[in-house]
Image: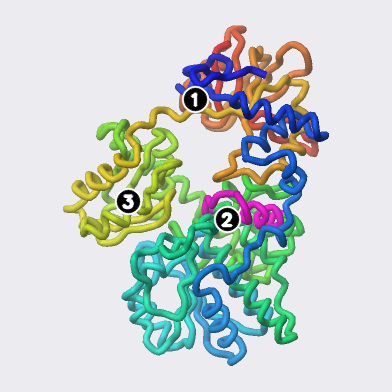
């Protein structure tokens, strides 16, 4: 296995076809992986993956088979959890009128569905309210909260509410509980409870939870209190498919309890017992057992489509319905909206990239703003800008002198805190979020100074010092080692996603045996090192950069190839496939 020093590059690749330096395991990581392989029955590639995640040889077995009961925290470690569960159960027992005010994204919809399904199992119903992204914006607003309070005894705000002092104060006559995970301010709204691992007075130990994770913990505490009264509560394990969907789609780090929640949730989802997820999986043409990729790139975007460009409550209604016919109709509608969303996103992305390039892509902040840009796609476009520049990015849609925008950050740069500060300084009408994603509302005449100030704050965190991101590789493989059995063992170290990237492997000095263009700008190739049968690889968006042209016109040259191994299911057959992410001339 190649050995890197601090100054060397893996396989001597200092500038790949995507302009990145390849960085392999350190000497110490290699030593630990080899030691683990000698004392276990695990392949070296799996041991390397575990070592890169900080797992010791003694911890390997438990890490590969995580038990949720061992990792689930005591809900009462979160501040206000006791009062929240107590008031929620009181409303259930007294048959009070309950309203659920949820955010319009996957996390909000899943959080609302968790409560709706749990309440239904207890013989109770609740009113669902999700604000319109364009007309009402993110989070509780005073008219909606006042109207809900006039007809309900308890309002539960999920995935929102931590900064909503005015709207919660407007809910006169009703009690309010907040179950959230967004960054808290110096003060909290006056209400029964604000349960949020990212309150400023929390220690941050559970800060990686999404809102659905917080809601699930409250239901754990509610069930525990019911058991103390000899009352059987609803099945909580059967709700983990919703928690898994929200955790992955909200890009929460797949570490600690999140990893266990998603692993168990995927097993629940594979049983195909939730009508909405069955219908959504069918319209997304999922024909294999669900994994984190499916949640993040097939199911999540479709659930989100309702909140982005359609009717805000479609996702939550789909996830909570028990009627297969209603589920099929809602899934079909969301699939159509997702297609429309992609078309709108494509137009905005092209304009935003051109504008950002004119402004400069080497500063601490990449941003763009445009008249009439749909607010439902600005977050996705910000993600694209962030990925292509390795800089924090903000994209804003302007209408009638007001800009509504969304931002995405890079590892090590806290965008939410910076936006929160710019809002506190009066340059934004409102703004907030968490480290990796945030939203803002700004008056058009303050747009330039607000973005200048935001750039200054991000610059202090080193955002301008980033070049093209290094490609971190977990090791070198021979083509003969890339087997379905190896992939299955690697998957046992997952699920992979935010905070726990899937391991990438390099294949050195490969000869391209065949090339075929597929779809819009994608490339499929066969490759071999001459010592075994050829493997297949697919590179999505290959012709957006240098990979496609180089491999398509390879002329017999050899290449180092790098990417993630997966099983390609096609026509009832299973084949090992490399999801090609980068390449370099050998």
Q: Residue at x 58, y 52 (%)?
A: 248
Residue sitting at 72 percent across and 35 percent down? 567
Disc 2 secondary structure class: helix
Q: Residues within 10 Å of mark 3 (few under 14, many from 20)?
A: many
Residue assigned mark 2 = 247
Q: Which mark is residue 418?
A: 3
Taking the view exactly as shown, the residue that stands out farthest to the top is 556
Q: Nearer the viewer, mark 3 or mark 2?
A: 3
Which mark is nearer the camera, 3 or 1?
3
298 is within the stretch colored magenta: no
For numbered disc 3, what is the local secondary structure? Answer: helix
Q: Disc 1 marks which residue? A: 543
Task: Tell me the chief SS of the magenta region.
Answer: helix
293 vs 238, left or right, is left
* Viewer-side residue, 115 vs 524: 115
Where 497 sits versus 99, above or below? above
Q: CA distance from mark 3 to mark 1?
A: 36 Å
């Amino acid at each position: 296995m190649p050995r890197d020093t601090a100054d060397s590059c893996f396989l001597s690749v200092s500038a790949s076809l995507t302009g990145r330096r390849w960085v392999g395991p350190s000497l110490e990581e290699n030593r630990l992986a080899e030691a683990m392989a000698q004392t276990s029955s695990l392949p070296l590639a799996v041991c390397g993956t575990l070592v890169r995640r900080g797992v010791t040889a003694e911890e390997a077995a438990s890490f590969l088979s995580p038990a949720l009961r061992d990792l689930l925290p005591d809900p009462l470690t979160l501040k206000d959890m006791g009062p929240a569960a107590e008031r929620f159960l009181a409303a259930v027992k007294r048959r009070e009128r309950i309203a659920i005010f949820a955010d319009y994204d996957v996390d909000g919809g899943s959080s609302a569905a968790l409560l709706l399904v749990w309440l239904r199992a207890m013989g109770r119903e609740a009113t669902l309210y999700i604000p319109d992204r364009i007309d009402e914006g993110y989070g509780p607003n005073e008219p909606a909260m006042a109207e809900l309070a006039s007809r309900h005894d308890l309002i539960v705000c999920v995935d929102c509410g931590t900064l909503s002092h005015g709207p919660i104060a407007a809910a006169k006559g009703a009690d309010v509980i907040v179950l959230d995970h967004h960054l808290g301010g110096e003060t909290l709204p006056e209400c029964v409870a604000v349960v949020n691992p990212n309150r400023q007075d929390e220690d941050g130990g559970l800060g990686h939870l999404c809102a659905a994770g917080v809601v699930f913990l409250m239901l754990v505490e509610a069930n525990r209190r019911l058991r103390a009264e000899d009352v059987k509560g609803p099945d909580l394990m059967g709700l983990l498919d919703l928690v898994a969907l929200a955790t992955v789609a909200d890009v929460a780090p797949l570490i600690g309890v999140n990893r266990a929640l998603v692993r168990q949730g995927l097993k629940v989802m594979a049983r195909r017992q939730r009508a909405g997820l069955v219908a959504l999986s069918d319209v997304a043409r999922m024909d294999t057992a669900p994994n984190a990729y499916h949640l993040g790139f097939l199911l999540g975007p479709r659930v989100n489509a309702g909140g982005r460009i359609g009717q805000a409550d479609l996702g939550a209604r789909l996830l909570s319905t028990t009627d297969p016919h209603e589920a099929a109709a809602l899934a079909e509608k969301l699939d159509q909206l997702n297609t429309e969303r992609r078309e709108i996103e494509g137009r905005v992305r092209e304009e935003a990239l051109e504008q950002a390039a004119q402004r400069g892509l080497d500063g601490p902040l990449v941003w763009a703003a445009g008249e009439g840009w749909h607010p439902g796609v600005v977050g996705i476009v910000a993600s694209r800008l962030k990925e292509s520049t390795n800089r924090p990015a903000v994209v804003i849609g302007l209408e009638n002198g007001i800009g509504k925008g969304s931002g995405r950050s890079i590892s090590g740069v806290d965008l939410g805190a910076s936006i929160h500060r710019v809002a506190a300084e009066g340059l934004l009408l409102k703004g907030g979020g968490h480290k990796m994603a945030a939203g803002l509302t700004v008056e058009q005449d303050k747009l330039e100074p607000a973005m200048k100030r935001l750039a200054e704050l991000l610059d202090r965190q080193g955002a301008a010092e980033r070049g093209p991101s290094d490609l971190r590789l977990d090791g070198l493989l021979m083509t003969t080692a890339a087997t379905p059995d190896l992939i299955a063992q690697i998957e046992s170290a997952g699920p992979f996603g935010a905070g726990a990237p899937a391991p990438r492997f390099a294949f050195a000095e490969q000869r391209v045996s065949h090339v075929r263009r597929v779809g819009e700008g994608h490339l499929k190739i066969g490759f071999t090192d001459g010592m075994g049968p050829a493997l297949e690889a697919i590179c999505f968006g290959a012709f957006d950069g240098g990979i496609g042209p180089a491999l398509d016109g390879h002329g017999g040259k050899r290449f180092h190839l790098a990417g993630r191994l997966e099983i390609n299911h096609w026509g009832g057959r299973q084949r090992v496939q490399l999801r090609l992410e980068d390449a370099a001339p050998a």
